[in-house]
Image: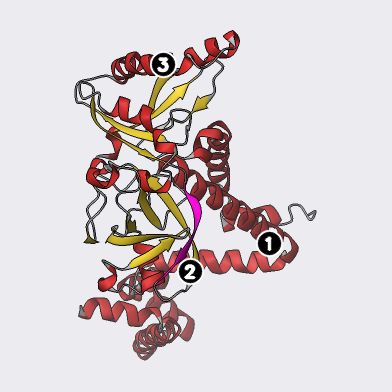
Amino acid sequence: MSELWRRLRALFRRSRLDHELEEEIESHLEMEAEERREAGMNVEEARYAASRQFGSVTLLREQSREAWGWRWLDTLAQDLRYAFRTLRGSLGFTIAAVLSLALGIGANTAIFSLVNAVMLRMLPVRNPQELKLVFQHAAAGDIYSFSYPAYRILRDQSEVLGGMIAFTGTGAAVLTGAAGEVERASRQSVSGNFFSMLGVDPLLGRLLTPDDDRTPGAHPVAVISFGFWQRKYGGDPGVIGKSVSVDESPYTIMGVAPPPFSGVEPGRAPDIWLPAMMMIRGCVVNPGCQTFRMLARVRPGIADGQAAAALDVVFRRHLLERARAIHNEHDRRNFLNRRIYLAPGGVGDSLLGRQFAKPLNVLMALVGLAWISTAHYSPKNWAACSTPVGGEP
């Protein structure tokens, strides 16, 4: 520690140390020269002999500076001083280069943040790499959501699935507290096994269960997010059991979700989760109300294609029943051509990521190229570019 402290002090006393070293070298040389003059040499011969006896002054300076501090830090400081002096001499070029880099780095950072949020960052749930998005995939390439009855039919295929959840898109809601204060918030309707299948544990209270989602309108309970709990209730642990009105319907807060969890839609964080049977009572029994998206876990040892084929067999029976009400032959044939499709769901269900996956990948490639090209431009390179060669700029 004493050695480290000595070297740190030397960094801020370099001028003084250099001056003291020069005085000491000069003193030694003068003493050596004086001894030789007393022995009968003239002044020049005495000085020359003293210098030869003393050794290389330059080497002594370098060895002393290395003993004082860190040579690499001295070199870095010299390089920076040189670059600064050179760039200051070409102020216009320096400003243009700095602004170009600032704009490029800012744009690249923004693009990477967007791609990371919607395409790269795994959900903070148990084993997110095992999650699969479930879609209806039409022959024309269109992707459809599911009705709640269709979700229930597919969810019960225990031979290939280790679990399946349904959720709606995050939408706006009007919340009214017990004191009458009104606030706009975001809500999401989910199946009762939403949190348990994802492996999310409550921070306070309890989360939704399958029993909360069996009968339409029977269980007016809610779970709030950590952020909403902090913002609305100031982190009050007594929030459990309080009543809140969501779109003029009363609900009892049963739990608070943990802070890392903000839903399964990147970029869209619900403030409150409600049982599907409560928020859209008519829709949960209507096969034509296709408002739900789904995530599933495939059982170990079963390939995605095998699971999709097994789900498709069951789903086609559901489609055949619904197709009886379609009288137009063209529409009926297109309807029956829908198939079950599984996709990786570890990052959640991002509409932005699905709709703009190719453009975002292209932007990420451009970010990589821009970073590689920017890395080649150091202050020394800028200085070299701005230094006149042969008298011409």
Q: Can you say whether 248 is above or below 34 in the image?
A: above
What residue do we see at 47% from left, 21% from top? Answer: 137
**What amino acid is found at the position of numbered circle 2 in the picture?**
Ala
- Give the farthest residue toward the right: 392
Q: Position of residue 125 (x, y in %)?
A: 28, 46
What residue do we see at 31% from left, 61% from top? Answer: 252
Query: Judging from the image, what secondary structure is the residue with disc 2 in?
Result: helix
Mark pair 3, 2: CA separation: 78 Å
- Of marks 2 and 1, which one's residue comes earlier in the chain? 2
**Residue position for label 2:** 77
Residue 30's label in the rendered image is none
Mark 1, Cα crowd under 10 Å, few <14 / some 14-19 / many 20+, is: some
Query: Residue 164 in magenta?
Result: no
- Of marks 3 and 2, which one's residue comes earlier in the chain? 2
Mark pair 3, 1: CA separation: 71 Å
Q: Can you say whether 167 is above or below 188 in the image?
A: above
Colouring used for the render: secondary structure
**Residue position for label 3:** 321
What residue do we see at 43% from left, 44% from top? Answer: 280
Q: Can you say whether 59 is above or below 156 in the image?
A: below
**Quarter occupied by the C terminus:** bottom right
- Of marks 3 and 1, which one's residue comes earlier in the chain? 1
Q: Main secondary structure of the magenta part?
A: strand
Mark 3, Cα crowd under 10 Å, few <14 / some 14-19 / many 20+, is: few
Q: Which residues are magenta?
A: 170-177
